[in-house]
Image (tube, helix red, strand yellow):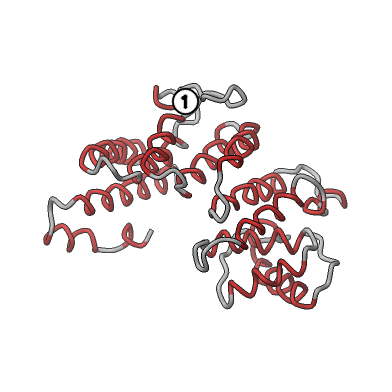
Amino acid sequence: MVAARSTVLAGWGGEEPGGPELAILRTRVAVEHSLTAAEASSPEAGRLERAARESCWAAADAVPSDPVPWVCLLALAMLDRARHRPEHQLRSSDPMLPPGPWGLLDEARRRDPGNREAHHRMLRYWHQVYRPAAADFVNVVMPRVSAGSPLAALPLYLSVEQYRNEPRRNAVVLRQWLREPHFSRALRAYESWSVSAPGSWPVADLSYLAHALWASAQMDAAAEVFAALGQFASRAPWSLVADSPGKAEELLLTARQQAFAGRATALA
């Protein structure tokens, strides 16, 4: 997050010290600092996490209609892998799903039902805390996703994580996207994107979609998505599925070339 590495907060705070938008931005920055410190195992991690949580709750009180504080609390939930905090132990309304921070997700969805970040944070939470629940979460969410919503790309992120965590990348695994459920995930996401408003899907989601369509040999559709991306692309998923992160750009360019050439020989 750019604001976390700049002086924008200090300047803005001098002009509007009590503004609600500033409270939201401060919360985002506090959460980013906390997550970075935890990843680096910094001795300041505990203190930064407590400060970030306090900022989240204060922002939720200050701007009750904004989903961001609740999204930020979902981000911080990943730091509580043992689920010690009460808000991370709530039962889901769906019996398929284990206890977790469902109340936080519900609060975000109450304010913005299709909030993309909230759902991605929740998916990331299950990947880190209890991986088997990730697929169940996506399966429960998808029937509620409206056509055209960027949330239609959520299963593509799940497919990439399932590929990354496969213990043996043998010939069957390399052809993952040609098999179910991965092939249909790509097709359904493409169909949803096809009816979306132009420019409504983030570059990251389109990059995942282009990869999934290419890897599943749906080349005409992949070429259409690559064309929509133009000169833009996100590093993921290419850096995650390439033989090494350094080969991400090479894989992206190969996939793009093959899609436009209409070749159906790509693996993954």
Q: Please tell me which residue is depicted at 72% across the width and 61% down the height of the picture.
A: 213
Relative height, residue 240 to residue 122 (above, below): below
Which residue in the protein does label 1 denote?
83
In this rendering, does residue 229 appear at all?
yes
Q: Please tell me which residue is depicted at 74% across the width and 50% down the height of the picture.
A: 184
Q: Percent from the top left, x then y, of residue 195?
A: 59, 61
Quadrant hosting residue 241? bottom right
Relative height, residue 194 to residue 119 (above, below): below
Which of 211/110 is in front? 110
View extreme (right): residue: 171
Residue 138 placement, left or right of 85? right
Which of 170/215 is in front? 215
Relative height, residue 128 to residue 250 (above, below): above
Which quarter of the rendered picture does the C terminus lie within? bottom right
Q: Percent from the top left, x then y, of residue 255?
A: 73, 70
Q: Please tell me which residue is depicted at 36% across the width and 39% down the height of the picture.
A: 70
Q: Percent from the top left, x then y, of residue 171?
A: 87, 52
Amino acid at the residue labelled 1: Arg
